[in-house]
């Protein structure tokens, strides 16, 4: 379950709550971006497959305001550990990279619906 407006680290920094079933559903680990700041919207999208979770945060500002980022978390023992933070090599402001994400085996896809250039306004994956 994601909570993009989780304010534990900063206003709208976001979080993802991992629940595990052992006869009943119990909240396990709360995931947050280690470098999360206000407006990152970590948890805006989430996909889970086996021992790997993808998390999108379209509000991250590495390539300009709201350029976005994706995060990879892997289960190591009984602890979820962030193993990568991904951004678009051609990231631009307002692209919202991470607004959607999908995971299949060793492949991850992140949507950047507002990635545009003067000649292209269709977004990118």
Image (cartoon, grey):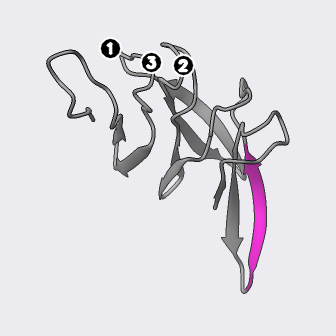
SS for tag 3? loop
> How far across and how far down the image is residue 122, in percent?
20, 34
**Mark 2 and mark 3: Cα distance apart in space:** 5 Å
Magenta stretch: helix, strand or loop mostly: strand
Nearer to us of marks 1 and 2 is 2
Given residues 33 and 64, the one toward you in this image is 64
Residue sitting at 72 percent across and 40 percent down?
12
Badge 2 vs badge 3, beta-carbon distance below 8 Å: yes
Label 2 neighbour load within 10 Å: few <14, some 14-19, many 20+: some
Mark 1, residue position: 90
Q: What span is in magenta?
A: 24-31
- Any mark on residue 93, and which? 3
Nearer to us of marks 3 and 1 is 3
Task: Classify 119 as above or below 69.
Answer: above
Label 3 neighbour load within 10 Å: few <14, some 14-19, many 20+: some
Residue sitting at 45 percent across and 42 percent down?
99
Residue sitting at 79 percent across and 36 percent down?
11
> How far across and how far down the image is residue 107, in percent?
32, 41
Q: Is residue 76 left or right of residue 85?
A: right
Q: Is residue 119 left or right of residue 7?
A: left
Given residues 93 and 54, the one toward you in this image is 93
Q: Closer to the N terminus: mark 2 or mark 3?
A: 2
Q: Closer to the N terminus: mark 1 or mark 2?
A: 2
SS for tag 2? loop
């Amino acid at each position: 379950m994601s909570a993009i407006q989780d304010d534990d680290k900063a206003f709208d920094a976001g979080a993802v709550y991992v629940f595990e079933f052992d006869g009943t559903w119990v909240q396990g680990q709360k995931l947050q971006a280690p470098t999360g700041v206000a407006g990152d919207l970590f948890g805006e999208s989430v996909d889970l497959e086996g021992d790997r979770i993808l998390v999108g945060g379209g509000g991250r500002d590495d390539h300009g305001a709201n350029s976005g980022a994706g995060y990879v978390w892997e289960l190591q023992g009984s602890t979820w550990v962030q193993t990568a933070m991904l951004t678009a090599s051609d990231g631009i402001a307002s692209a919202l990279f991470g607004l959607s994400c999908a995971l299949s085996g060793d492949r991850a896809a992140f949507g950047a619906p507002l990635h545009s250039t003067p000649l292209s306004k269709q977004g990118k994956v």
